[in-house]
Image: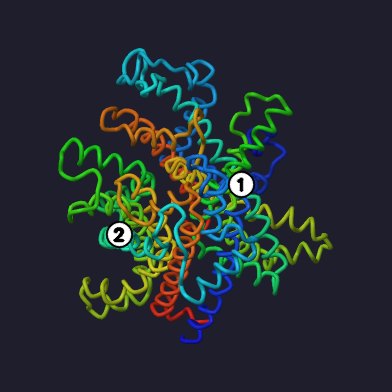
Amino acid sequence: MLRFIARRLLETIPVLFIIVTATFFMIRFVPGGPFTAEKAVTPEVMRNLERAYNLDKPLWRQYAGYLGKVVFHGDLGPSFKYPNRTVNEIIADKLPVSLELGAWAMLIALGLGLPLGIIAAIKRNTFMDYLCSAFGMIGICVPTFVLGPLLALSLGIYLHLFNVSGWYGPTDRILPGVTLGFVYAAYVMRLTRGGMLEVLNQDFIRTARAKGASEFRVIFRHAIRGGLLPVVSFLGPAIAGILTGSFVIETIFQIPGLGREFVNSAFNRDYTLVLGTVILYATLLIGLNLVVDVVQVWLNPKLKFE
Amino acid sequence: MPSLSPHSLPAADLTPDQLEQGTSLWRDAWARLRKNRLAVTGGLVLLVLTVLCVCGPWFSQTYQDQNLNLGATPPGAAHWLGTDTLGRDLFARMLYGGRISLMVGLVATFVALTIGVTYGAVAGFLGGKTDRVMMRIVDIMYALPFTIFVILLMVFMKEPSEKLDGWLRGTLHLEGLQGVGNMVLLFAAIGAVEWLTMSRIVRGQVLSIKRMEFIEAARSLGYGRRRIIFRHIIPNVLGPIIVYATLTVPAVMLLEAFLSFLGLGVQPPMSSWGALIKDGAEKMEEFWWLLVFPGSVFSLTLFSLNFLGDGLRDALDVRASKD
């Protein structure tokens, strides 16, 4: 297993290198810079600005300098749009908010999806099953950017139960978390139902029942491990979706997280902030995917670390 | 596909055996699909929506007719679904927006389909080392934050796409082609993301079919490679491709709406359902209808596409998981 992890980590290096390089050159080859949006400045001021941010050097030297700083010092450079702030500071400031939002969403996705999926599988083809399956379909077909504003409109504006925007008290976590987690709860429910149904039809379950194991024991000792496999392999895409999904959620609910910052930084041509967030998101995603892969093999003896 | 119905043939010429032959994979599938009420309803809803969006604008007001004195009015007799803050008829805007959304869904899916099927078929058919390298690349790309790249592409390629737009209008004098550069960019960006799963599915199918006995039989009959691929392999992969394509359309439309919601998709004065939802979400406190109607129609479309896709999957008996 250690060899598997080590090899995957080694593979990550060229991937990250390609991501950084591709992003760096893609955002640089396009006309317009971080200072073009501001009021017309005299050529001298422009030159000074460019010198201050190393933009006057040839592109390959900027690239080499940037890469060196990132690799050897973990320094993502100064932000172009926020004077006197470094990208590292901005990320340290905003990332925890996005991570917390993502954690709430994940909690809702699993906390809602798993029980409903198991119930639907046990009570197959009953009213309960149809109810749960309907929930699964609604979750998949009502996208976050429809659900979020609708929840804000009904529960926030009409019923005054929640704040429509902001990130202050604990109740401010509910609407964004539910909105972001809902879609994934639906997917988790469908996958749990399918996985459990497949396992419950297998011989070893019949054996367990024949031995007189209680229904509770059959489901939670014997079936659940195999039944949850599809959910585990879905966690990788789910994590990616929740990370990027938070861009929209943070916009809808005015949450000061990294997702909104990233979209703004792209609009503002804040080169270093764009690069920094891309590197961070890529590392996070690749790392979490690796964790998911390890858990998957650990749960399913049929798979092996190759 | 015109199927051979036994009734259209002189019955006297047919032995009972030949009558049995009339049932093909496709006819079976069609019969199964027709029994699936949800899938049929989904298909019908899609048909109605498509006809409305394609033909409706010929009879309604244009999407950009403004009436600033009117402002935002709630749904009523004159404007069935109300008007937006610029006094534009919401129903007309939804019809035009639907055109764009549906077109993006179809064209971007087609782009993803072309890339994915070619890539997957080549990898599966060649096999061996080529296959391993090609699929490893797909594996690695799966782990990438692709939505982020699409966002970057949409922001940073905006000016080049506008240049393309200006060039098209300037040299070809096609004023109607407003925003084409932007659309091309949208198709390319979305198509570049959505082909990965398709390539995996096609490769898996090609791999398993390649080893089947009827391919062996075709080989032993001396058929060439091309004939084997096009007459024997492709028709047998078509089922999964159709099913997955139907399920890719909602995914693509979702991505387009996601981009439009962030202000990166279709640019004003043009509109798509995603852009209308964004607009509605900003003004929902005073004008609820601007959010509720576009949101409902969009969700209804996703519902229909998913039901139809699920129905097709069951009908064609494809054992591929949804993701």
Separation (CA) of disc 2 from disc 1: 33 Å
Q: Amino acid at mark 1?
A: Pro
Q: Mark 1 — residue?
A: A31
Numbered badge on residue A7: none
Q: How is the image coloured?
A: rainbow
Viewer-side residue, B234 vs A211: B234
Is A218 placed above or below A261 here?
A: below
Quarter of the image containing the C terminus of chain A?
bottom right
Is A14 placed above or below B293 here?
A: below
Hey, which residue is sitting farthest front in the picture?
A44
Position in image of residue B318 (x %, y %): 53, 56
Q: Residues within 10 Å of mark 2 (few under 14, many from 20)?
A: some
Q: Is residue A118 visible?
A: no
Quarter of the image for residue B302 reads top left
Q: Is residue B18 left or right of residue B241?
A: right
Q: Mark 2 — residue?
A: A97
Question: Residue at the location (35% across, 33% down)?
Answer: B280
Q: Is residue B188 visible?
A: yes
Position in image of residue A96 (x %, y %): 31, 63
Q: Residues within 10 Å of mark 1 (few under 14, many from 20)?
A: few
User: Which comes before the other along the chain, label 2 or label 1?
Assistant: 1
SS under mark 1: loop
Position in image of residue B200 (x %, y %): 58, 62
Question: Residue at the location (26% across, 73% down)?
Answer: A220
Q: Disc 2 is attached to a residue of which chain?
A: A
